[in-house]
Image (cartoon, rainbow, N blue to C red):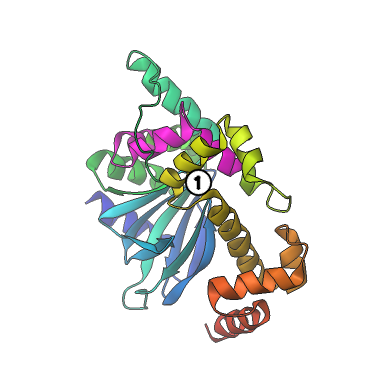
Amino acid sequence: MSQQQIREIIDRRLTEDGVVATGVRGVQLFRVTDSVRCAPAVYEPTLVAIVSGAKEAILDGRSHVYDSSRYLVCSMSMPVEAGTPTASPENPLLGVQIALDTKVMTELVIETESAAGAIRTPRSGPLPEGIALAGWDDTFTDALLRLVQLADSPVDTTVLGDGRLRELYYAVLKGEAGDSARRAFGVGNEIARSIEYLAGHLEEAVTIDAMAAHAGMSRAVFHRKFKQATTMSPIQFVKSMRLNSAAMSIAGGMSVNEAAVDVGYLSASQFSREFKRAYGQSPRQWSTTRQSATAGA
């Protein structure tokens, strides 16, 4: 019933396609009725809960489809291809997108583990991936409903918003994606911190050695743990982050040369070669295709 109530709130707030802020920091409601093929994107640390329809994110060739049975938790910045291939006016995509506050999540992970008796040290073994899907359990559903219900009252939003958001974060940590979130935001989050550093310095010549040093690891250990968490080698990841960010900028109207420089490419020809190899089109062809698609939408 709670999920249906969330849908009714979104239906009431959004009668046309778009995104609307709820008043709680980082919490937005969205509605999509256009079928959009997966295209390059960069997911920041985010939670996405769908109450109608389905969305797809592809990471390194692996598809993650999430809908009203599974929500998505992206614990670190990730280069993906994302789309809404099944959305239509008859089957709209309705949901809630929540930016995960790194500081609050870290504090909550440490506080939770401390309350349990001791802050846990990272266990050995493979790291959980940075993108995880989790089933809608009662704790998560109720916390999300309580959060989006605040949208009906600015006073309630101001007074209760941060507390309700914290409650939802806690539900995520207790759910199926909790392991991924704890490893990204708690003790042993060196890979997540190195990715956060990279995401803020795409225009610079960030080397793998520098990222390993930032994580406090040898190059070999960093390479192994990085691939466990992202499914990609550090070199693949850096290239994907840069190309995906540039593709998004070009689709938004930025010139090809400006987009290339913005993500650290000094050679326009190298940028064009790598872009075409990744997406099957030159940057200028991509720009024309995306602008035509936007005009027709």
What residue do we see at 41% from left, 38% from top?
181
Q: Residue 196 at what x, y percent from top left?
A: 59, 42
Task: Say whether residue 171 is magenta.
Answer: yes
Dot 1 amino acid type: Pro
The reply to whether residue 171 is in sight is yes
Q: Residue 171 at what x, y percent from top left?
A: 33, 36
Local secondary structure at mark 1: loop
What residue do we see at 55% from left, 83% from top?
293
Task: Tell me which secondary structure the magenta stretch mostly adopts.
Answer: helix
The reply to whether residue 14 is in sight is no
Does residue 128 sit above or below 124 in this rendering? below
Report the front residue among 23 and 110.
110
Among the 4 quarters of the image, the one containing residue 25: top right
Q: Which residues are magenta?
A: 168-196
Does residue 78 sit above or below 117 in this rendering? below
Left or right: 259 as drawn, with respect to 174? right
Left or right: 20 as drawn, with respect to 88? right
Left or right: 272 as drawn, with respect to 120? right
Report the front residue among 95 and 218.
218
Does residue 38 sit above or below 127 in this rendering? below
Report the front residue among 114 and 256.
256
Does residue 60 sit above or below 45 in this rendering? below
Report the front residue among 271 and 41.
271
Q: Residue 189 at what x, y percent from top left?
A: 49, 32
Left or right: 182 as drawn, with respect to 91? right
What residue do we see at 74% from left, 60% from top?
262
Q: Which residue is the site of mark 1?
A: 45
Which residue is the extreme one toward the top?
A: 117
Task: Say whether residue 19 is magenta.
Answer: no
Which residue is the extreme one toward the front?
A: 220
Q: Residue 286 at what x, y percent from top left?
A: 61, 79
